[in-house]
Amino acid sequence: MADRASQTIFVMSAGLPWPHDAHASDTLGALDDVALYQQGEPRPCAIRRIASGGAMIRLRDAPLSGAEVALELATGQRAAATVEWARGEEAAIRFRQPIDMVALLNRKLVAQTAERRRMPRVELRCHVGLRWGGSLAAATLRNISATGIQVEGDGLPATDTFVSIFIDGLVIPSGEVVWKQGRLAGIELMEELRWSSLMPWIRTQARG
């Protein structure tokens, strides 16, 4: 892509965004830059994953477990949090109060110019149907962005396979499997998903 798309993942499920099964592809590329406040002093950091309950961040000299901090979000909110754990340049923080993920996504979109506005990568779970040739497979969506999806399931098609994709409530273009690892696969869409169609669907999914 011409403009290094952010790989920050917006996790729409309830809970904390540091799963044990995070795929390596989740960590590659540029991330959203924000500020972490500790004892009133701002420090630059980047968000790897964020959910209503907390965030995984990257920064030099991560604060120790138990430290009281605050993360300044794109909405202008400064969310008070506690450091759950820190390893090297990565730390997990738990918010004292849940944040509004739909509002955060909206602010992310508004901050972009209209002609370049696109959805970031959003993690949520729903059923996905895949069809290629005479084959069919049922899978679970792991995350979705303007340009692709990540799915999990058995019997997924091989790399370089062109597939039709079916997700309830969302018109989604066909795509090509660009990587596969075990039960996971990444599919690049043949056409970009517009934020104006994707955002209402995400709001519906977030309401459960």
Image (cartoon, rainbow, N blue to C red):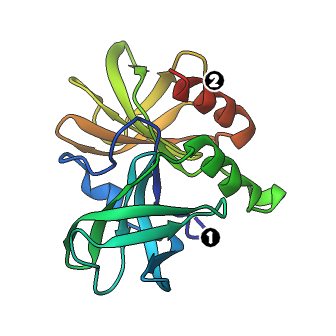
User: Which of the two labelled residues, at mark 1 and mark 2, occupies the earlier sequence position?
Assistant: 1
Can I make out residue 173 in this image?
A: no
Residue positioned 71% across, 32% down in the render: 197
Q: Is residue 10 above or below residue 128?
A: below
Identify the residue under disc 2.
171
Residue most toward the right? 114
Can I make out residue 4 in this image?
A: yes
Residue positioned 41% across, 53% down in the render: 96
Q: Quadrant of residue 205?
A: top right
Q: In the image, which disc is placed on residue 176?
A: none
| SS for callout 1 | loop
Q: Is residue 145 above or below residue 82?
A: above
Residue positioned 30% across, 30% down in the render: 157
Identify the residue under disc 1.
3
Q: Position of residue 19 (x, y in %)?
A: 24, 46
Q: Quadrant of residue 160?
A: top left
In this rendering, position of residue 80 left or right of residue 57: right
> Looking at the rendering, in which quadrant would you find the N terminus?
bottom right
In this view of the protein, which residue sits in the foreground, 172 or 169? 169
| SS for callout 2 | loop
Question: What type is the residue that disc 1 sits on?
Answer: Asp
Residue positioned 28% across, 80% down in the render: 62
In this view of the protein, which residue sits in the foreground, 198 or 78? 78
| Total marks placed | 2
Q: Residues within 10 Å of mark 1 (few under 14, many from 20)?
A: few
Q: Quadrant of residue 50?
A: bottom left
Q: Position of residue 200 (x, y in %)?
A: 68, 30
Question: What type is the residue that disc 2 sits on?
Answer: Val
Give the spatial CA distance, label 1 vs label 2: 26 Å
Q: Position of residue 182 (x, y in %)?
A: 16, 39
Q: Residues within 10 Å of mark 2 (few under 14, many from 20)?
A: few
